[in-house]
Image: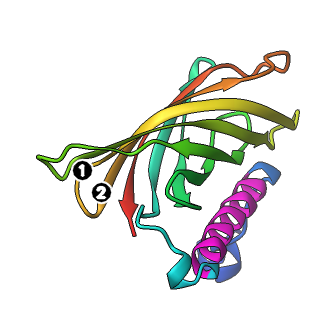
Amino acid sequence: MHDLSDNLKPAHLFTARSPKMKSKIIALVTLLSSMTTIGMSMPASAQVSNQSSIGPSVLFGNGQSAIGVDSKFPLSDNFSLRPFIYFPDNGTDFGTALTYDITLRNTDSTLQITPFVGGSVDVNTGSNSVTTVSLVGGADLDLSESIRLKGSIIVPLSTDRGQGTGIAIGAGFRF
């Protein structure tokens, strides 16, 4: 007879049940530790006025949608790294984009719009691991000192591996 208390032991609570789940956990931990390292490695004098952000995002494309985490880490006033991770049905997608940011500010408002354009490298860890180079374009909309909305379009340079154009929509907490 199976004792239900066996399922509540700490070893069962934190064990990934499948290789897919293990790869998703590893990818998420890697992304979060990379973002923390980047943020902590910059001395205060080198940090730019444009704030970093991280938050939830939804990616639409190839007839499916995926939830994930999107972020932005400014390297200078006009360049940013944008690491991301998404969890579609066919594995885990993670990578980073390097973007050129164009800050537009309305002098009558605190509302700030920042269009961006750049390139990204995306890795899918599904059964057919795929690495894709894509063009990225979109805009950040800073609603307040702490909230940022983001929308972007991702266009792969090669579609021979089934990667299609995607649209990402998300929100971020600025810090």
Residue 143, label in figure = 1
* Residue kind at label 2, given as amino acid type: Ile
In magenta, the rendered stretch is 21-40
Q: Are marks 2 and 1 in contact (CB under 8 Å)?
A: yes
* Residue kind at label 1, given as amino acid type: Leu
Q: Which residue is mark 2?
A: 147
The quarter of the picture where residue 15 lies is bottom right
Q: Residue at x 45, y 51 (%)?
A: 56
Badge 1 local density, few (<14 within 10 Å), some, or many (20+)? few
Look at the numbered disc 1 and give the secondary structure of its residue.
loop
| Magenta residue check for 34 | yes
Q: Nearer the viewer, residue 20 or 93?
A: 93
Inspect this view and state whether residue 35 appears.
yes
Q: Residue at x 78, y 33 (%)?
A: 133
Q: Residue at x 79, y 17 (%)?
A: 159
| Magenta residue check for 166 | no
The percent coordinates of residue 12 (x first, y second) are 68, 73
Asked if 10 appears above or below 131 in the picture, the reply is: below
The quarter of the picture where residue 65 lies is top right
